[in-house]
Image (cartoon, rainbow, N blue to C red):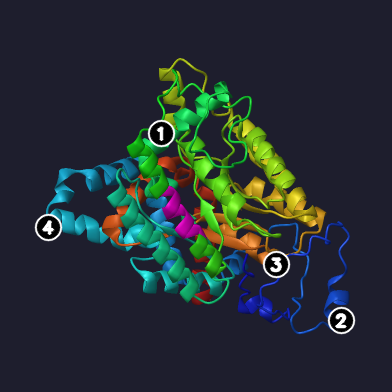
């Protein structure tokens, strides 16, 4: 994984070399040499000077927290976050943008699209093309953050759509490669965009049935890591599924080739590829693609292909442990992005409709515990060996706990195997606090033409209602900093 971009405010205090160096797992002791001793040592020019991260996250000094955010942008961000925190406004916006009124060229649709582009799109997206995405990432780099570039595209339903989407993902790698080194931490891929949804559903059914009946043979299945645990829900598949047809096997071969081409391009560009998670109805097939590709491409200390674990699922920790330990036995460095999850309503409804208990944890407290337990496990693992972890959280407490755990384990601040992440335009206070404490932090940044990205953004808005509504902490700190700036100007 590439080295973190260091903003000017840190460069004044720290000699730093941006050459990419593999993380040395020998730094496992909680005891860390005093900063003065480290800085006094005479190091070769190729060696990075590393200071230990601060376990405490500072949210009190709002001037420092938002020091790299211009007042105009701070005002606009506050306004957008206030608007998106009002659920009726989100409902109205999603209804309007999906209505027939938007399908024709008329004054209302033009006004709605122009308003969306200048507010919602501009706040949550990196831009419409490579040039604007590069400028957005440059702005992040100046503030000490990095970008995870996401080609904002919806699910594909045929091979023509998959081929178009693949071109977009390959272009994303090219865009990332054209930017300054270490600007982009990951390229994100949606398997549902390069493999037809119907095929993913069929594959998931077949994989679930094989879990029920190990004698069930899947001739197309390649080497993989464990996909299910003993507690994984299998209720989606009620009866023995038919084998893949010749046409479906041909489509699977095409999907494998698409994913292989994307993985190889990321290997050549030295940029990790992170596979997003989806509904449990297709997640088994997504994990199969992820793990079989990780076996092929993950070498040495740092993974190239990362999977995603949704910790709001009751079986999340058990599945992660099984996959992680199996990868370790095979000598495969495995990387995971940990998230809470975004399909709570639909997952609970599907389970209820089929007469089964929800796969989601019964309480939010259980979900928080699962995320934090998985985080602890992965941090201990990367502190003592190969692998990687992305802690994708908007939860302040989880951020504090993970920061304290990393500090306890002696994980260095410029660590190639650990990254915090938040959605672009969300949880700015947490992102800046983690960065100021010395951790690598990335923002999840979709980009592409408005017409292409809007369906994706609408779905994200519906999935992340809770996150949008809970942006009060950010809004409170932003208001505090705006008031401070006004007072400073007046006085």
Labels 1, 4: front one: 1
- Kindly identify the residue that appears in the image at 41 percent across and 60 percent down: 169
Labels 1, 3: front one: 1
Q: Find disc 3 in the rendering and name its residue.
A: 414
Range covered by the magenta-colored residues: 255-263
Mark 2–mark 3 distance (CA, rounded to whole Å): 19 Å
Q: Residues within 10 Å of mark 3 (few under 14, many from 20)?
A: many
Residue 60 position, x and y percent, is 65, 59
Labels 2, 3: front one: 3
Q: Residues within 10 Å of mark 4 (few under 14, many from 20)?
A: few
Report helix, strand or loop for mark 4. Answer: helix
Mark 4–mark 2 distance (CA, rounded to whole Å): 66 Å
Report helix, strand or loop for mark 1. Answer: helix
Tell which circle, 1 or 3, labels the residue nearer the N-terminal end.
1
- Seen from the viewer's position, the closer of residues 418 and 178 is 178
Q: Find disc 4 in the rendering and name its residue.
A: 107
């Amino acid at each position: 994984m590439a080295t973190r971009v260091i903003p000017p405010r840190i460069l004044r205090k720290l000699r730093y070399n941006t050459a990419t160096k593999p993380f040395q797992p020998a730094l496992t002791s909680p005891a860390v040499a005093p900063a003065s001793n480290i800085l006094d040592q005479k190091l070769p020019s190729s060696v990075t000077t590393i200071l230990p991260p601060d376990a405490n996250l500072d949210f009190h000094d709002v001037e420092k927290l938002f020091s790299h955010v211009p007042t105009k942008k701070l005002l606009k961000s506050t306004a957008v976050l206030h608007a998106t925190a009002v659920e009726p406004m989100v409902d109205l916006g999603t209804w309007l943008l999906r209505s027939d009124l938007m399908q024709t060229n008329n004054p209302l649709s033009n006004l709605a699209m122009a308003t969306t582009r200048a507010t919602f799109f501009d706040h949550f997206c990196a831009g419409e093309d490579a040039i604007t995405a590069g400028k957005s990432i440059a702005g992040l780099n100046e503030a000490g953050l990095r970008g995870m570039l996401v080609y904002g595209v919806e699910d594909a339903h045929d091979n023509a759509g998959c081929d178009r989407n693949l071109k977009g993902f390959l272009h994303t790698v090219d865009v990332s490669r054209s930017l300054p080194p270490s600007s982009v931490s990951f390229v994100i891929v949606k398997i549902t965009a390069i493999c037809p949804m119907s095929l993913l559903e069929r594959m998931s059914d077949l994989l679930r049935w094989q879990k029920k009946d190990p004698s069930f043979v899947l001739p197309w299945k390649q080497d993989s890591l464990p996909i299910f645990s003993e507690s994984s829900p299998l209720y989606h598949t009620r009866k023995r599924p038919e084998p893949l047809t010749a046409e479906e096997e041909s489509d699977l071969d095409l999907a494998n080739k698409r994913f292989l081409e994307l993985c190889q391009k990321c290997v050549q560009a030295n940029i990790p590829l992170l596979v997003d998670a989806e509904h449990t109805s297709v997640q088994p097939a997504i994990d199969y693609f992820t793990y079989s590709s990780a076996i092929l491409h993950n070498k040495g200390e740092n993974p190239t292909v990362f999977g995603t674990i949704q910790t709001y699922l009751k079986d999340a920790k058990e599945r992660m442990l099984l996959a992680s330990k199996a990868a370790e036995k095979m000598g495969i460095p495995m990387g995971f992005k940990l998230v809470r999850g975004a399909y709570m309503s639909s997952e609970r409804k599907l389970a209820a409709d089929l007469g089964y208990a929800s796969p989601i944890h019964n309480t939010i407290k259980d979900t928080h515990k699962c995320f934090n337990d998985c985080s602890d496990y992965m941090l201990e693992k990367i502190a003592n060996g190969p692998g990687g972890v992305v802690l994708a959280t908007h939860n302040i407490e989880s951020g504090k706990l993970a920061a304290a755990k990393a500090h306890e384990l002696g994980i260095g601040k410029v660590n190639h195997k650990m990254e915090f992440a938040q959605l672009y335009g969300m949880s700015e206070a947490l992102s800046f606090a983690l960065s100021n404490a010395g951790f690598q932090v990335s923002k999840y940044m979709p980009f592409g033409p408005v017409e292409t990205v809007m369906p994706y953004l609408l779905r994200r808005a519906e999935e992340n209602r809770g996150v949008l509504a809970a942006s009060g902490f950010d809004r409170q700190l932003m208001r505090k900093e705006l008031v401070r700036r006004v007072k400073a100007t007046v006085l």
